[in-house]
Image: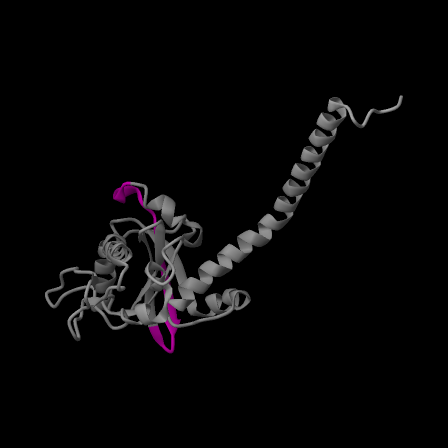
């Protein structure tokens, strides 16, 4: 039987077959590439954690350096109790932040570099246009910031996106999250500039007030979740 290629039926059948073939091809490609994509995501996460302690590396170098410098990774609850049955690296911080504080699983990474120990905590908050996140590394006094790394999903280029720049992140180095009386104060991100040598404040990004405030709120909210853990580690260290 001769097929009438000019008919509407032929056009519909042809279009339907092409749609099915394209969808099938995309599905097969997605399935094949998914493991690679997941591995890349994990490597990028390792890169970010390492960057908080000053180790900048290529994505493919991250697994080896992560294994070398990250000596422990575990989860705690808001009471500071360790939960060994959960893999810290698989925790989705975005999902955890949606839970009530008492139900959250809080990852902790412990790094050793040049004979010193650092405690690394993930942080997550909200910028002007979407989520912002990062990692904060504290020195072994669990007070002094050794390094930070921040990232974002859609902050304005040249303004809020400056949170990823070295000049902004370097401001946090040496700042302290507790005051002289031991009270948790976190780090203020000050519009118009922080006072000289302020131990608990950094300069905000000019023209990016909402993103700067988002960083400030992110640090205070995220780090406060770890206060009981920090207290337990401090008490343990003081008794040794």
Q: Is residue 79 above or below residue 64?
A: above
Residue 103's x, y, as percent? 30, 42
Residue 109 painted magenta: yes
Q: What is the quadrant of residue 167 in the picture?
A: bottom left
Identify the residue at horizontal 71%, vertical 26% (top origin): 12
Which residue, as the protein is rendered here, is positioned at the far bottom?
114
Looking at this view, name the residue that lies furthest to the front.
6
Classify 169 as above or below 29.
below
Using the image as rendered, state which of residue 133 and residue 83 is in the foreground.
133
- Vertical placement of residue 16 versus 232, above or below: above
Q: Position of residue 100 (x, y in %)?
A: 27, 41
| Quarter occupied by the N terminus | top right
Q: Nearer the viewer, residue 71 or 131?
A: 131
Q: Position of residue 35 (x, y in %)?
A: 59, 50
Q: Picture coordinates of residue 80 (x, y %)?
A: 26, 53
Q: At 45% across and 64% down in the image, what residue appears?
A: 47
Residue interval drawn in magenta:
100-116
Query: What residue is at 38 percent from the left and 78 percent from the top?
Result: 114
Tell me: 201 left or right of 96.
Answer: left
In the shown orientation, is residue 182 left or right of residue 36? Answer: left
The residue under the point 34% across, 50% down is: 129
92 or 196, nearer to the observer: 196
Q: Quadrant of the C terminus?
A: bottom left
User: In which image quadrant can residue 139 be found?
Assistant: bottom left
Residue 164 in sight here: yes
Horizontal side, residue 95 vs residue 189: left or right: right
Question: From this viewpoint, is residue 71 visible?
Answer: no
Q: Is residue 177 left or right of residue 35?
A: left
């Amino acid at each position: 039987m001769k097929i009438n290629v000019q008919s509407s039926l032929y056009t519909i059948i042809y279009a339907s077959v092409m749609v099915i073939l394209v969808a099938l091809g995309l599905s097969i490609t997605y399935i094949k590439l998914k493991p690679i994509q997941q591995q890349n995501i994990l490597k990028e996460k390792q890169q970010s954690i390492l960057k908080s302690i000053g180790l900048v590396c290529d994505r493919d170098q991250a697994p080896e350096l992560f294994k070398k410098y990250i000596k422990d990774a575990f989860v705690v609850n808001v009471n500071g109790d360790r939960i060994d049955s959960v893999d810290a690296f698989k925790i989705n911080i975005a999902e955890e932040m949606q839970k009530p504080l008492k139900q959250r699983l809080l990852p902790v990474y412990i790094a050793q570099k040049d004979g010193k120990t650092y405690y690394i905590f993930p942080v997550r908050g909200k910028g002007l246009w979407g989520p912002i996140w990062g990692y904060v590394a504290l020195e072994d006094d669990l007070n002094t910031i050794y390094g930070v790394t921040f990232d974002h999903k859609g902050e304005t280029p040249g303004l809020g996106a400056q949170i990823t720049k070295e000049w902004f992140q370097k401001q946090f180095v040496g700042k302290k999250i507790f005051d002289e009386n031991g009270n948790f104060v976190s780090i203020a991100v000050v519009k118009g500039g922080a006072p000289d040598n302020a131990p608990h404040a950094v300069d905000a990004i000019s023209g990016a007030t909402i993103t700067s405030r988002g960083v400030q709120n992110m640090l205070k909210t995220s780090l406060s979740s770890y206060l009981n853990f920090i207290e337990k580690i401090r008490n343990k260290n003081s008794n040794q």
